[in-house]
Amino acid sequence: MASPVKLLQGIRPITHKGALRDALAGVSLAAMDIPQLLGYARIAGMPAVTGLYTALLPLLAFAFFGASRHLVVAADSATATIFSSQLSGMASLGSPEYVSLAGTVALLTAVLLLIARLLRLGFLADFLSRTALTGFLAGVGVQVALAMSGDLLGLAVDARTSVGKLLYVLGHLPQVHVLTATLALSLLLVLFAARRWAPRLPVPLLVLVGCIAASALFDFAGKGIQVLGPVAGGLPSLTLPRLGWQDIVALLPTAGACFVMIIAQSSAASRVYADRHHEHDDQNANILGLSTANAAAAFSGAFVVNGSPTQTAMAEQAGARSQFAQLGFVLVVALVLLFLCQWLQYLPHCVLAAVVFAIAIGLVDVKTLRAMRQESPMEFRMALATTLTVLLVGVEQGILLAMALSLLHHVRHSYRPHTLMLAPDAGGRWQPLAVQPGRETAPGLIVFRFGADLFYANDTFFASQVAQLASQAPAGLRWFVVDAGAITSLDYSAARTLLELYRNLSQQGVQLLFGRVNSYLRADMARHAIDQVVESRYLLPTLHEALALTGVAPQEESTGPR
């Protein structure tokens, strides 16, 4: 049964001092984030003003219904890339039809999130590993960077795939517009330098304002530098997205991909900052907040919104400690929409592309990838495979692969877990060693440890290792003790395998015992009637008791927990 909805969890409790601090932080966040919102709209293929729309009603909706005090919910590059890759083949970018389709995706995403809240599926975020997410975001970053390459160089790129865009740009370098490319590359140097040496300053906003002023003063458009053109200002009007059955069927997979990314990214970001500030974080309440935020985006002419890790980090840097900061953010965005939108018409495409390019490159976490390569080559290959899938196949396929690889990586460890046996070292003291057929723990005794739960995929592996150790043991083996400390459950298949193994060992004159049998494993053994075949005196709660039953005293006290 779903728990009752609690409002304003991300704001309450708050003091006058805290409200003032957060309001000022929201103004600072707006100064840093407005250029990014315009950039995200560019990634999404939406009119520039809709990027600002994502920081109005969606922000307010999450502040009311969400639980995280830190998560900033607005436009995000990852979700913008996911739906734009699908919608670009259904309607012209920025057209009214395209905007309506984007609203449909946002509404479908809101419905999926609401279902997830009702079913209390906040745990789904755990199924997308940090490894796969790093690879996915790297792929999105490179894809977005390639998508901006045409605007950076003043080229009209006629290609849809990332590889096609790269090849097109390389093949048309002689047609690069020199003024556009010079301006864009200069701005990139400024943006990257500011990120390195002045991350707290609103350099992107200063760049944007300066370039708008220069464009209006020196007529950049007349010199061949493309500009946005007239931008409709004012607050968004409430509209109902198109809800044709064919559109819903066609866009549901895209909404599903957005749903997965929102769950994963938002959960990861909110948990990081909740842990940092020693706060409780209700993931199911956050899912409800994200659902209402996407519904607000759909009805206000915007597009899918997400809990952005980068914007959340910016908010904390600005001093925000509750969702009250987002109210200040909303106020600044509303003032821009009401009074300053007419100036956006002078904004050069290459300037916005430079801001977006800098954002995209920031998604490629080189430090984490390098650490993965050194510490876990297999996980590095998983991340790389996800990156290449995003680039060569598509964003939706990339996120599905990311989830599949995350699950397979976990299953792989459970399918072939670490196994150990106790065996005497040169001094005769028992030590945990890799399984070595032909050895025994002590005359007539083998102690074996299995490092995972028993289920249908690994029960054969378990049985084969036990059988091999028993068959190749020195003559006179009487006791085989399984250290079950890591086994908390077993399914029907594993139970049948265990019973068969017990009977086979009994026929060989070997008694199978289980030590460190926890309450969960004992309950499963009772459910599968194992305790009716294996006597209860052979199912022992500690390894010490199991060894005592064999009559063989341990030679090393540190053989494991008792």
Image (cartoon, rainbow, N blue to C red):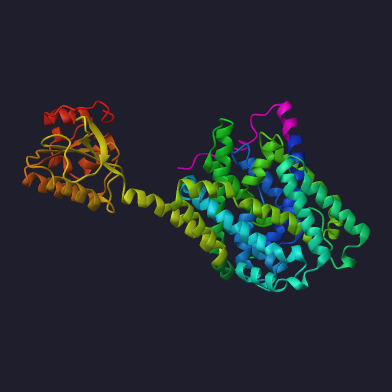
Left or right: residue 155 versus residue 223 is left
Q: How many marks?
A: 0
Residue 509 in picture, x, y percent from top left: 6, 42
Dominant secondary structure (helix, strand or loop) of the stretch shown in magenta: loop
> Hey, which residue is sitting farthest right in the picture?
217
| Magenta part of the chain | 1-22
Image quarter of residue 557: top left
Foreground residue among 274 and 377: 377
Image quarter of residue 49: bottom right
Left or right: residue 230 versus residue 546 is right
Q: Is residue 118 something that shows in the picture?
A: no
Residue 380 in picture, x, y percent from top left: 48, 52
| Quadrant housing the N terminus | top left
Tell me, yes or no, whether the highlighted magenta stretch contains residue 15. yes
The residue that appears at 74% across and 36% down in the rendered structure is: 25
Left or right: residue 423 versus residue 301 is left
The residue that appears at 81% across and 54% down in the rendered structure is: 234
The residue that appears at 65% across and 69% down in the rendered structure is: 165
| Quadrant housing the C terminus | top left
